[in-house]
Image: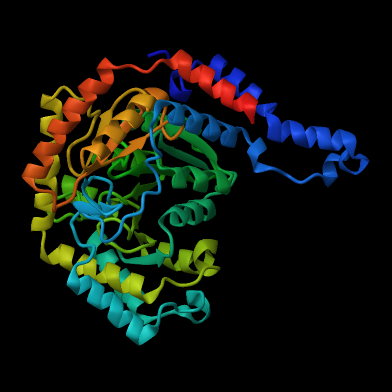
Amino acid sequence: MDPARNLFGLSAQAKARLIEKLSSAAPVRSVRLARQADPDLRDAAGARLDVSEFEAYREIRMIRDAAEFLGISDPFFRVHEGIAGAETVIGNRSYVNFASYNYIGLNGHPEITNAAKSAIDWYGTTVSASRPVSGERPIHRELEHALAETHGTEDSVVLVGGHSTNVTVIGHLLGRNDVIVHDALIHNSIVQGSMLSGARRVPFPHLDHEAADRLLRETRPRNGRALLVVEGHYSMDGDVPDLPAFIAAARRNRAWLMVDEAHSLGVLGPRGFGIADRFGVDPSEVDIWMGTLSKSLVSCGGYIAGSKDLIDYLKLMAPGFVFSVGMAPPAAAAALAALQVLKREPQRVRRLNDGAALFLQLAKDAGLDVGGSIGASIVPIITGSSIRAGRLAQAMFRRGVNVQPILYPAVPERAARLRFFLTADHTGEQIRDTVAILSEENRRVVSDPSDLAAVARHVASSVLSR
């Protein structure tokens, strides 16, 4: 695959030509003509900004034009008409569902929904203030103590959003005299937090602990701080880092080690307690544990677990906590109840891992590209083409299987894929039937390649007609 190819298989030069044409399309030209005709609009300072002039938005329009030409319906924002687990209902039709973070099947569990309802009855639907001011409730500390116990740390703090947890914590712990060394495939929230901090950001090749060690040694500022960041379970690829090796790298270079457990809790290890549980290492060797409440814990929000001093500092200084409303009581209660079920029923984790391992093996046997997935809960099927991924996802949907394509620019064009999320509630029959359908439809899509030249002509025509 030519690395210069990106947007639905077009070369970088072809994409640039299309964007140039789109830049001169009707909506933009009309603004320019209006400015020429009306003296009051000639001054750019007085003109209104238009998001349609953003290059990224023009790319979105081009991708939509290409999909429309190919007869690929938009796979995003589909409305699910109830609880989405191993099965879901979309448009009054039932689908086998592989697009849910409901890993251990707890969404809708009566114990958890009753806990959320009781919290509403007792506290209402909101705490109506930031926690330092007057938003503190007992349910917050109960959840934080339970999370700290799970991660083997002294304390934890919960925040209202998973993405914003990484942004505010990394953005506030590090500064311009510091360095952040992270996996090249790290989550966007960590990248955004790193950018906010002003620290030097240095990515290392995916999972390469030796490169991380070398980069820490080479870039660590003499009088500054260093942070090494990895994910416990990578959400795009379903693979895991060598945690003991990254712990050693952090210790050798006097760096903090932060592990994002968003897709690890409830998934990895015999108890589902995450990557430390999987490797059998002392969790106190990790300085900062981060996780979300929206996956296995079927709620919403994020958390940091670590030393008491770290948590005290964040609770008094992290802007995303200090200046944000406290977590809604029903969300906190749901997460706490889900954590209690996880601890009581580790067999859910075994069912999840067994089903994911079956899916992975069947996909490999069918000759499908699963990348580096370990088959714990996430299995990508890499197509190498956004168009192929979109066509394959639509074919699966027609056959009663809901799975999302991951397309450029979310991933490089050559890494476009379908991403299957397994749950503890998927049956062996559902998994076998799905892989059989997947193999059949993939062969059909591969045998009927799209005419990229025709796609490019259609997109260019659409651009010029606007």
Between 342 and 175, which is closer to the camera in this rendering?
Answer: 342
Is the residue 172 above or below the residue 23 in the image? Answer: below
Location of residue 370 by image quarter: top left
Residue farthest along the bottom direction in this orientation: 122
Is the residue 243 above or below the residue 144 in the image? Answer: above
Residue depicted at 19% across the width and 52% down the height: 87
- Looking at the image, residue 169 sits to the left or right of residue 349; the answer is right
Between 358 and 308, which is closer to the camera in this rendering?
Answer: 358
Residue 369 point in image, percent of width and height: 23, 25
- Looking at the image, residue 217 sits to the left or right of residue 345; the answer is right
Residue 215 point in image, percent of width and height: 43, 31
Residue 86 point in image, percent of width and height: 18, 51
Asked whether residue 3 appears in the rendered view, the answer is: no
Q: Quadrant of the N terminus?
A: top left
- Looking at the image, residue 301 sits to the left or right of residue 198; the answer is left
Q: How many marks?
A: 0
Residue depicted at 21% across the width and 48% down the height: 95
For the rendered model, the colour scheme is: rainbow
Location of residue 150 by image quarter: bottom left
Residue 348 point in image, percent of width and height: 12, 56
Between 1 and 325, which is closer to the camera in this rendering?
Answer: 1
Asked whether residue 456 appears in the rendered view, the answer is: yes
Residue depicted at 42% across the width and 13% down the height: 2
- Looking at the image, residue 359 sits to the left or right of residue 236; the answer is left
Between 429 and 177, which is closer to the camera in this rendering?
Answer: 429
Q: Quadrant of the C terminus?
A: top right
Residue farthest along the right direction in this orientation: 39
